[in-house]
Image (cartoon, rainbow, N blue to C red):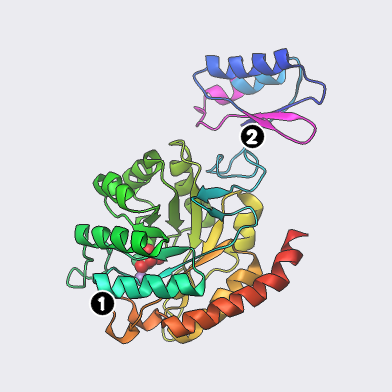
Amino acid sequence: MMVLMKREATQEQIDAVVETIASHGLSALPLPGGERLAIGIPSAIPTELRPVLDTVLSAMDGVDQVIHITRPYKLASRDFHPHDTEIRIGDVRIGNGNFVVMAGPCAVESYDQLLESAKAVKRAGAQALRAGAYKPRTSPYSFQGLQREGLEILKTVAEEVGILTVSEVIDPHDVERVAEYVDILQIGARSMQNFPLLVSAGRSGKPVLLKRAPSATIDEWLASAEYLLTQGNEQVILCERGIVPIDRTYARNTLDINAVPIIKYHSHLPIIIDPSHGIGHARYVPSVALAGVAAGADGLIIEVHPHPERALSDGAQSLTPQAFERLMAQIKAVREVVAPVLAR
Ligand code: PEP
Ligand code: MN
């Protein structure tokens, strides 16, 4: 629910509306607009309270109209936050016109492997190093990640090379620990609806990269983002990584490029593209990455491995450092053409 105030509404009238909402045990969020103010109610409103609140608020002085929002997300929507969110981590800015590239191996495998990867992706211009220490694997027999040792390696390498890090957390009980080691917490596709994990990650105060589950609708994805936002964490980055394909013969998933303009229209949160998991084969990754750039994504997360043929996970979709460097030059060229067009 959102209360749209009249253009000439006074501060007293605004305060009275806020107090009335609070007196019903709900939070009120004043949302300054261009010419007039709206007051959002981000919390869930009990069904029986809705008509009462509608009648009471509509009759108050200074109120123009009461708008009902039926979407499952509020704080993630542009209704409640019209301007693009910009996330700042050190010198790096994400969203609001700032483009970010996160790159690195699927998993931390060893100190040497990660150091080589970090140096390569940094040299090519990536702002963050990606690498999983906890790997959610379909089979329990597959490599599960180096876990705590992986986090130690990630931190050591990132400090040596001077690069931000993003790494997945899969267990709500590990959030605090992982948050001590990395700059951005990644919530993977399989965990998008692990609600206790979302609450813990929201409370951590760390920036969170929230991947879309392969079968999740846009509403479900944004409702998961809402879990993070309702914990007071506004540093949420969405990541489209491919949805369930109709055919796995040629591609691992189907990257839903539609998600970029749709999210941009309905949400203020930055959205980045993961072409590696999206298509699943290194030879196709550059084309899909560039499509994401052209569609207006706020960044990319790309798997890069110094020796893809030896990778313990996702080698087939990992770019070599040389291929990544070539792609970065192409990204730059496409950005130069697209950025001014998108800014219009
Ligand atoms: C990953 O980033 O390595 C990963 C496991 O991704 P997703 O959750 O998108 O499958
Ligand atoms: Mn992977």
Residue ID for mark 2: 68
Under mark 2, the amino acid is: His
Question: Split into 4 quadrants, where in the image is the N terminus?
Answer: top right
Q: Is residue 46 magenta?
A: yes
Q: Give the magenta-colored segment's residue range.
A: 30-52
Q: Is residue 105 visible?
A: yes
At 49% from the left edge and 27% from the top edge, which residue is drawn?
46
Which callout, 1 or 2, points at the residue further toward the start of the chain? Answer: 2
At 69% from the left edge and 18% from the top edge, which residue is drawn?
14
Under mark 1, the amino acid is: Leu
Determine whether the residue tagged by mark 2 lies in a helix, strand or loop. Answer: loop
Where on the picture, by quarter, is residue 317? bottom left
Q: Position of residue 103 (x, y in %)?
A: 44, 69
Who is closer to the viewer here, 191 or 32?
32
Picture layout, residue 114 above or below residue 225:
below
Picture layout, residue 323 above or below residue 208:
below
Q: Which mark is residue 124?
A: none
